[in-house]
Image (tube, grey):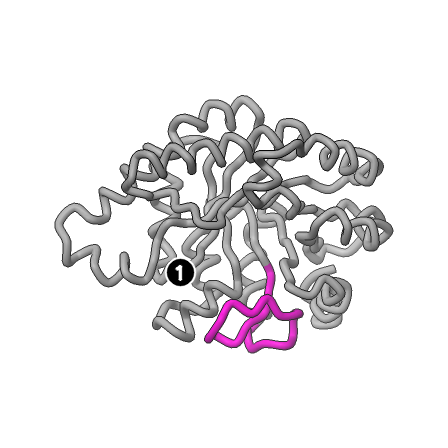
Amino acid sequence: MSTLPLLGAAMPLDTFETLRDWMLAEPRDLELQDFITADVLNGDWQPLVDRAARLLDGHAGRLGIHGPFWGLSLANPDPDMRALVTRRMEQGLAVCEALGATQMVIHSPYTTWNYNNFDNIAGARDEVTELVHATLDPVIARAEGASVTMVLENIEDKDPDSRCLLADSFDSPAVAVSLDTGHAHYAHGSTGAPPVDYYVTRAGKRLHHVHLQDADGHADRHWRIGHGNILWPSVFAALAPLGDQPRLILELRDKEAILPSARYLQDMGLAR
């Protein structure tokens, strides 16, 4: 039995249908991408849940969804807009409850502007934390009751610690940390952030989810693994002490690149 970590993937149901044999051959973690947009969440999404139930029959991996994020900031200072963000989080949790999903990816509020101005504007760091709590506090009890963990994914985060400390501030099993390797590599290459493996190490046991994508340090490429210049041995060495706690999710723009990316990491002796 291989001791290499097992790869999962992020995909819509249409893609899962084509990769079902691979996903079911081992208990691979799955992140569904069908429940991101307002059109879906405001509409009748039950048929999608019913379809998922049929397709996922026999799936033994952990199930999560990518939560809504387009145009949404967890730290929106406008109370009316913040109420909308809370509503979207509630809608995402409702989908998780219907699917039996145990994880929802949400986006970190931190920007490069934040990083450069936290020590320029008194109280700016605390204000972001307070705004995120105003957004998420109303849904934490529901997430806990549904055994759903909301994982904060780095987007522009130059500082690996900010969203980790934000997750800690909730003191709840319903809030943990996600890492997107391509976003971290962008921050490293374009804004002077630490390299990707440092993000893993600094998150430590808070890290429950990883988006694996390759990139060039300039943009959010979501390339197949091996087509960018992320140093994958260092990333997987940093992940090793965390065991199977973080879900290792291939999140690629080209879904046909999922299997070649998995083979690439397997050939490197890093994952299976």
Q: Quadrant of residue 50?
A: top right
216 in magenta:
yes
Name the residue type under label 1. Glu
Is residue 92 at all visible to an observer of this figure? yes
Q: Quadrant of residue 82?
A: top left
Q: Which residues are magenta?
A: 212-231
- Residue placed at 46% from the left, 46% from the top? 152
Q: Which structural element holds mark 1?
A: loop
- Residue placed at 44% from the left, 55% from the top? 154
- Residue placed at 38% from the left, 42% from the top? 74
52 in magenta:
no
- The residue under label 1 is 156
- Residue placed at 48% from the left, 32% from the top? 173
Classified by dominant secondary structure, the portion drawn in magenta counts as loop
Q: Nearer the viewer, residue 225 or 246?
A: 225
Where is residue 48? Give x, y as percent: 73, 37
